[in-house]
Amino acid sequence: MERSKAAAARRTPRPIRKLNKDKYLLLMVLPCLIYYLVFRYAPMFGLVISFKNYNLFKGVWASPWVGFKYYHTFLNSPDFVDLLRNTILLGVTKLVFSFPAPILLALMLNEVTVSFLKRFVQTVSYLPHFISNVVVASMVLTFLSPSTGIVNHWLKGLGFHAVNFMSEPGWFRPVYVLSEIWQHVGWETIIYLAALTAIDPLLYEAARIDGANRWRQTLSVTLPGIAPTIIILFIFNIGDVLDIGFEKVFLLASPAIYSTADIISTYVYRVGLGQGNYSYAASIDLFTSIISLIFVCTANYLARKFSDNSIW
Amino acid sequence: MRKGLSMLLLISLALGLIAGCSGGNNEGNNASNHKADSKNSSSTSNSSNNSADSSDSNANKTSLPEKTFTFLDVSHPSWPYDENWLVWKLLKEQTGVSFKVQVPSGEMADALSLAIASGELPDLLYTEDKSLADKYGQMGALANILDYTDIMPNFKQWMEKYPNDTRNAIAADGKMYIFPNQGIGETNRMIWMYREDIFKKLNLTPPQNWDELYTVLKALKQAYPDSYPLSWRDGIAYLLNFSASFKTSNDFYYDYDTNTWKYAPLDDNYKTMIGYFNKFYKEGLIPPDFLSIDTKQWQDLISTDKAFITLDYIGRIDFYNTPLRADNPDYNLLFMPPPEGVPGSQKNAFTQFDQAGMMVSGDSKNIKDVMKYFDFLYSEDGKNLVSWGKEGETYTVKDGKNVLNPDYTTVADLRKKTGLSTDGAYTWFDYDAHLSLSSPELASAYEQARKYDSQQQPMPTLTQTELDDTNVEMTSIQKYRDENVAKFILGTRSLSEWDKYVSDLKGLGVDHVISVYKEAYERSLQTAK
């Protein structure tokens, strides 16, 4: 009996034996795999329309090829430089200011010893994450309105001039980034707080015995403890530099501030959906995705080179 | 053995899931089978799909064959589609036609493109936007209505009566893919309005021209320092309405005086208008955030005595007066004649058209029957039925004039209860039906407003190649215009730089787009002959 089983095992090739061994695990992964294949990878074939003069009725395959025509149009359009600059600047500003915010909040919360207070701050700070962008944008516009807004009311009360925030190009980036931080800081803190709990308390004890104060402990134990998390999330965020959420920018922008607020995704919306030029929109989208991919690969390469942590 | 089995299981599970995900197509096939079924049944036996609601009128309807059309129709949030509406019952009594309606769960435009891409089209489709009809029509998805005018005597007569509306429904290739919509457009009429009670209190009269407008606004601002006497919504888009009194527009337009196509934001008259707005802005006569004021903020301004002159849809007269008089019986928002901008021009932009309408699938097996049904809608009887309903049931005749029953308080109420004048239930409409429900103020506004109509703009349709050719240019041009017009009004760019602005705009390809419009317009004149 034993021998025949072993013989059977020998007859089946190794990969299949391995599959068989992990079959339940594989079965559990399967739905996830199928989800990605069907909803993430299959739609990618749609990008082919960026090389075609896409005719909705004829369908993707029957539409005629046009090569790089749409990429050419985009790169030569008079808006291209402005769009790229605005997109990168907005993305980088957002990265620089809103990436460290949850880390700081997490470090501060970590120092709070009153657990009620800690929970309270955490709850209050992550609630805005659940407000939709439409509501956030209209809140921002209402608060900052020069005629009826509460912010200008305060400014005037303090003796300053009223500022027409949403009509001055210079104010767009600060307003956008601040509202992003307000909206998401609490939510993003959760992951750092989780990383903090994984730090061995013995390390703190050892540091205290060596005479380290709270500040020194933060620098030498806490920060290195969550460094892998920080690096991984940073690489993720790099990928989003060009891929700024369309919704809120679109809702906040007005023609007077196009010089800072018109970004690639709002342009894609106006040309692609507004004017029904799907091929053109798809080519711009692919173009930005490729740049994002380059960003992520570079960041990952640098991370691997200068630290032990990277995504791959 | 067991290994083989488990592998098989795994693979079949994966295949099953993939098949499940692509099941949309199967459903589509089923739907078309249903369609075929219902068609067969209707041709073989008329009585098979008789529903209860038509039994009461069996007597006068025996000669009419029964047909059921599938219909992708829109459902308005304020009067959601209801298959039991009176209007469907009346239409069935008259024509024998009933509908199997699908309502999109999201945007109509998305539902349309999905339906077209799937290749499984219902007999009838609805669109809010005529350019979609042209686009899909030229791709080959829709029936050309002009091919069937031989079996549509009423529609033929109608086209002779309304040559403008007919021409505007025609696509760039000279075919017609959408049924022209006439009458209901009145609801889109936009007018100037002013607060008669406040004007009376301050001893002001409505301004005759823009200089007087300035003085009046100043006086209002003085009496109400917190206010922005002239307010409107949607920012730059409404410059179209203001510009009519300046003999210009807000975009590419046809100048009837010189018979040429022009780009309005380059006109000197346009500059004059921007100059006024710049002055208004500096002195706080318009809201500082006029670019981003939305409907809600605008409503707050109008209803809290913060704005006294505005420009919007004509129906806003009742919209404000009716509820606000509960607290302030004197509240009186009335029609105001448009102030003269440049000498001899005292106009409102022509907005009283509606581009929405119904299209017929090119694949439909029922095209001829659908056309016959629509022919009825273009008859006087058809118009009467979809506008007023049924005498005795929804309206009565008083002194030779139709009057809707008083149990319908507003047009919205009428729509909700009967389905009359809901999307997809009409195409030629008698607007007097809506007027019979309006207040004396609104009725008088309609009467006065007609005196200030500007000539309707032609709407030539571009071919797909022309669209592809111009839409990147148009996007850049519009962006440059919006950005700089905003700056000129806000004063962040000085009007002395106007010439530079004009040459920059020209550099973006204005002349090319104008030539494309000109060509398309001449083509549309040719086909209309």
Image (tube, coloured by chain):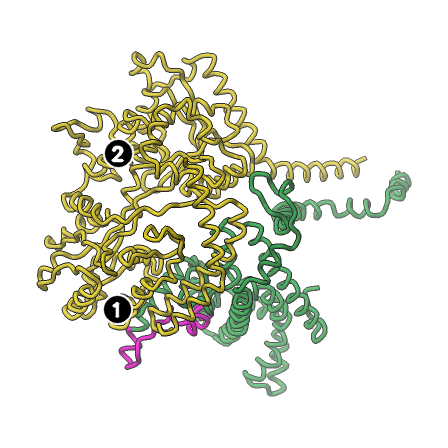
Chain colours: A green, B yellow
The first of marks 2 and 1 along the sequence is 1
Residue at horizontal 22 percent and vertical 40 percent from the top? B410
- Residue A117 percent across, percent down from the top left: 43, 71
Specify whether residue A99 is in view: no
Specify whether residue B396 is in view: yes
Which quarter of the figure is the N terminus of chain A placed in?
A: top right
Question: Which is nearer the eye, B268 or B47?
Answer: B268
Q: Amino acid at mark 1?
A: Phe
Q: Range of the magenta residues?
A: A153-179
Q: Mark 2 falls on what kind of element?
A: loop
Q: Residues within 10 Å of mark 2 (few under 14, many from 20)?
A: many
Q: Residues within 10 Å of mark 1 (few under 14, many from 20)?
A: many
**Residue with the mark numbered 1:** B280
Q: Mark 1 falls on what kind of element?
A: helix
- Residue A21 percent across, percent down from the top left: 77, 47
Tell me how far mark 2 sits from mark 1, CA to CA.
40 Å
Which quarter of the figure is the C terminus of chain A placed in?
A: bottom right
**Residue with the mark numbered 2:** B430
Q: Chain of mark 2?
A: B
- Residue B460 percent across, percent down from the top left: 42, 45
Residue A236, picture quadrant: bottom right
Residue A224, picture quadrant: bottom right
Q: Chain of mark 1?
A: B
Q: Is residue B8 left or right of residue B58?
A: right
In the rendered image, residue A200 lying in the magenta stretch gets the answer no
Up-down relation of residue B51 to residue B141 (above or below) = above
- Residue B391 percent across, percent down from the top left: 21, 24
